[in-house]
Image (tube, rainbow, N blue to C red):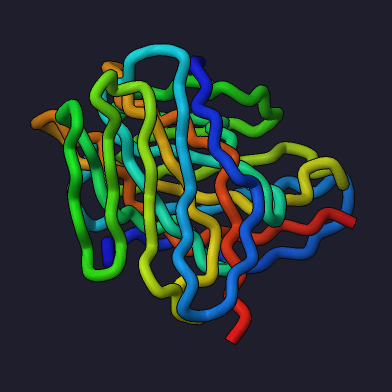
Amino acid sequence: EADIYQTPRYLVIGTGKKITLECSQTMGHDKMYWYQQDPGMELHLIHYSYGVNSTEKGDLSSESTVSRIRTEHFPLTLESARPSHTSQYLCASSPSGGSSDTQYFGPGTRLTVL
Amino acid sequence: GQQVMQIPQYQHVQEGEDFTTYCNSSTTLSNIQWYKQRPGGHPVFLIQLVKSGEVKKQKRLTFQFGEAKKNSSLHITATQTTDVGTYFCARGGSNYKLTFGKGTLLTVNP
């Protein structure tokens, strides 16, 4: 198993609150990703980063934002949570170099917005 | 991004039966990866296939990459209850992003 961590694991919060989902990896991977996944459904890429100070929007539009100030840390922020943001958020990282783009996933954060 | 179609969406088997899920693309794949996600868990990398016609085995799991590199399959021999979960294929790209299929949910009746 890869060393990638997400906190909190579960979060129940009221509408309008600002939240930050934490993701950290200790493998020195340059590439990191955020996915949104509803229960039993496919994974949707919402943000990715190729390294420090690099962030890009993914294939699914999201109101969240991300930052990458340190290699190991890739937090995701929602300025004003809404019930439509209720979902599971999965963070992943991928090693640099070579031809492999294998991704290692964290345990996820299950977000419920009331 | 370019999609990968995965079938079937669901498969229910009796323990001991075989299981196969298929992943298809309309365009040539540079590589294909397979992941398994247990219920309530997160995706876990199983394998990557790169070469045309490649076949790889992991115990009861057999992974194949088509000759034209447009399709792939995962076959499980003699399923066990521990095989329960959703199996995703994902196409790799030159930009280090993966495009995941919608997954096949496997349930196993003991």
Give above or below for A102 relative to B75: above
Given residues B69 and B30, the one toward you in this image is B69
Task: Choose top left, top right, bottom left or bottom right for residue A102.
Answer: top left
**Residue A8 seen in the figure:** yes
Q: Residue at x 56, y 46 (%)?
A: B103
The quadrant in which the N terminus of chain A is found is: bottom left
Q: Given the current orientation, which residue lies at the most extreme bottom position?
A: B110
Return the x and y of residue A60 as percentages of the image width and height. 63, 25
Residue B87 coordinates in the image, percent (x, y): 48, 53
Count how many numbered circles sit on residues in the image.
Answer: 0
From this viewpoint, which residue is outermost toward the left?
A98
Q: Residue A86: horizontal and vertical position, in percent? A: 78, 50
**Residue A14 position (above or below residue B51):** below
Q: Is residue A67 left or right of residue B94?
A: right
Can I make out residue A51 in this image? no
Name the one closer to the observer, B100 or B28: B28
Residue at screen point 29% across, 23% down: B69
B97 relative to B8 in the view: left or right: left
Can you say whether A101 is above or below B59 in the image?
above
Q: Residue at x 27, y 17 (%)?
A: B94
Q: Quick one: quadrant of the C terminus of chain A?
A: bottom right
Q: Is residue B57 left or right of residue A92?
A: left
Residue placed furthest toward the front: B17
**Residue at coordinates 59% horizontally, 40% vertically from top-left?**
B102
x%, y% of residue B37?
49, 60
Horizontally, residue A22 falls left or right of residue B27, namely right
